[in-house]
Image (cartoon, helix red, strand yellow):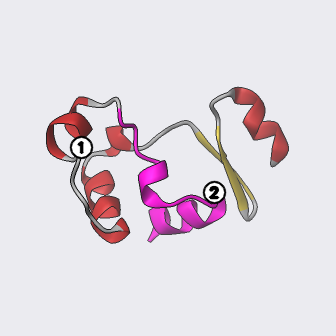
Amino acid sequence: EKLTDLLQKLGLEANQLVRKSEAYYKENLKGLEITDNELIDVMIKNPKLIERPIVVAGDRAAIGRPPEAVLEII
């Protein structure tokens, strides 16, 4: 539920929040077609897959890469 809310605040689909350079992604997910809900479940079980840092300010959020992106929400 928290991750779904975070995705809404970021304005992203689940696959846009995945770190595709992670070994787990390359070995287990790359090339697969899975739903957002399935991907969210995988990210919850494997938090290294989640792009970070994420900053939340009220009803908005931003990925802190580059750090200047956070300035848009604060």
Q: Residue at x 75, y 39 (%)?
A: 70
Q: Tag 2 or tag 1, which sits nearer the N-term?
A: 2
Q: In which quarter of the image is residue 65?
A: top right
Q: Name the residue under label 2.
A: 10
Mark 1 is on which residue type?
A: Lys
Q: Quadrant of the N terminus?
A: bottom left
Image location (x, y in percent) of residue 74: 84, 46
Real-space Cα separation, disc 1 to disc 2, in angstroms:
23 Å
Q: Residue at x 81, y 49 (%)?
A: 73
Q: Name the residue under label 1.
A: 30
Image location (x, y in percent) of residue 21: 34, 29
Apparent side of residue 24 relative to residue 50 in the rendered image (left or right): left
Q: Visible in this render: residue 18?
A: yes
Q: Are marks 1 and 2 in contact (CB under 8 Å)?
A: no
- The boundaries of the magenta stretch are 1-20
Image location (x, y in percent) of residue 6: 56, 61
Mark 2 is on which residue type?
A: Leu
Point out the frontmost of discs 1 and 2.
1
